[in-house]
Image (cartoon, rainbow, N blue to C red):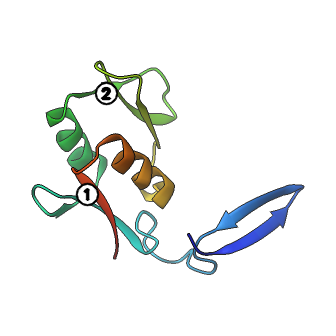
Amino acid sequence: MSGVWVFKNGVVRLVENPGAGSLQGASRGKVLVHLPTNEVVTSYEVLERMLTSLGWERYYDDPDLFQFHKRSSVHLISLPRNFNRLKSMHMYDIVVKNRNVFEVRDS
């Protein structure tokens, strides 16, 4: 992970691509790729189709989040409601919970 540590309002956080705010929101230099089809995930509709085929079910409990749960595990995938706010940490969460199915690549 590379970037710049920013201290603001008493909170320190890592900004991955400083000055890249004008780039196309979701990618920020990274894309989520579905390995079996080599398809780049470009929307939540595409991601939902891929995750449901793997046994994930959509949760509708929190209107501010796009969530998936797998009955056979304790895993929960929580994503921002707006696909343009999807960050690499969300992509890596999907990769870790679906080994050998997804990969994060540089765009």
Q: Residue lying furthest front in this view?
A: 100
Which quarter of the rendered picture does the C terminus lie within? bottom left
SS at badge 1: loop
SS at badge 2: strand
x, y percent for residue 15? 65, 68
Is 105 displayed left or right of 16 in the figure? Answer: left
The earlier-in-sequence mark between 2 and 1 is: 1
Is 32 displayed left or right of 13 in the figure? Answer: left
Of the pair 73 and 13, the residue shown nearer to us: 73
Q: Is residue 29 above or below residue 71?
A: below
Q: Mark 2 points at which residue?
A: 58
Q: Mark 1 points at which residue?
A: 41
The residue drawn where x is 59% and y is 71% is 16
Real-space Cα separation, disc 2 to disc 1, in angstroms: 17 Å
Of the pair 93 and 31, the residue shown nearer to us: 93
Q: Which amino acid does label 1 sit on?
A: Val
Of the pair 53 and 45, the residue shown nearer to us: 53
x, y percent for residue 9? 88, 57
The residue drawn where x is 30% and y is 18% is 71
The residue drawn where x is 24% and y is 45% is 45
